[in-house]
Amino acid sequence: MAIEELPGGGIIVTGKEDIRIAALTSLAYGIVLEMETGMKPTRNFSALRIARYHGLIPEGTKPQKKKILRLVVQEIRRVKPGWEPSEHLAKALTK
């Protein structure tokens, strides 16, 4: 497997084929970070802007962070069938 998840929730990407999944997974964790703490994953970009960049949200709409998180998880599952979110992401999805 090209992406390995560490027990603490971190990830290691070891192959080119899963770069999109790694980016989407990082986006999902960034959204959870925004939901739980209000901190943005990067200084200049919000999760909404990054999700638009990946084509998950059309221009002119501004869904809530929980809906963005659901869309990101759906996209990861579409790209990599059988993928399941970590406990941390699953917990954020059920809130």
Image (cartoon, grey):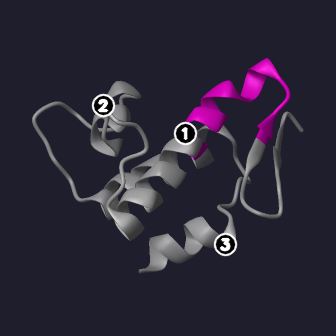
Query: Which residue is drawn at the image coordinates 71% and 53% (left, top)?
Result: 83
Examine the rendering and report whether any part of residue 70 can be seen. no
Which residue is situated farthest in the right direction here? Answer: 1
Return the disc, 1 or 2, that comes first in the chain's sequence. 1
Query: Which residue is drawn at the image coordinates 64% and 36% (left, top)?
Result: 21
Marking on residue 44:
2
Measured in 3D between alpha carbons, the distance from the residue under mark 1 to the one under mark 2, in whole angstroms, is: 18 Å
Vertical order, 77 against 8 (above or below):
above
**Callout 1: 10 Å neighbours few (<14), some, many (20+)?**
many
Q: Nearer the viewer, residue 59 or 28?
A: 28
Measured in 3D between alpha carbons, the distance from the residue under mark 2 to the one under mark 3, in whole angstroms, is: 28 Å
| Residue that label 3 marks | 87
Q: The disc labelled 1 sits on which kind of residue?
A: Leu
Measured in 3D between alpha carbons, the distance from the residue under mark 1 to the one under mark 3, in whole angstroms, is: 17 Å
Marking on residue 24:
1
**Callout 3: 10 Å neighbours few (<14), some, many (20+)?**
few
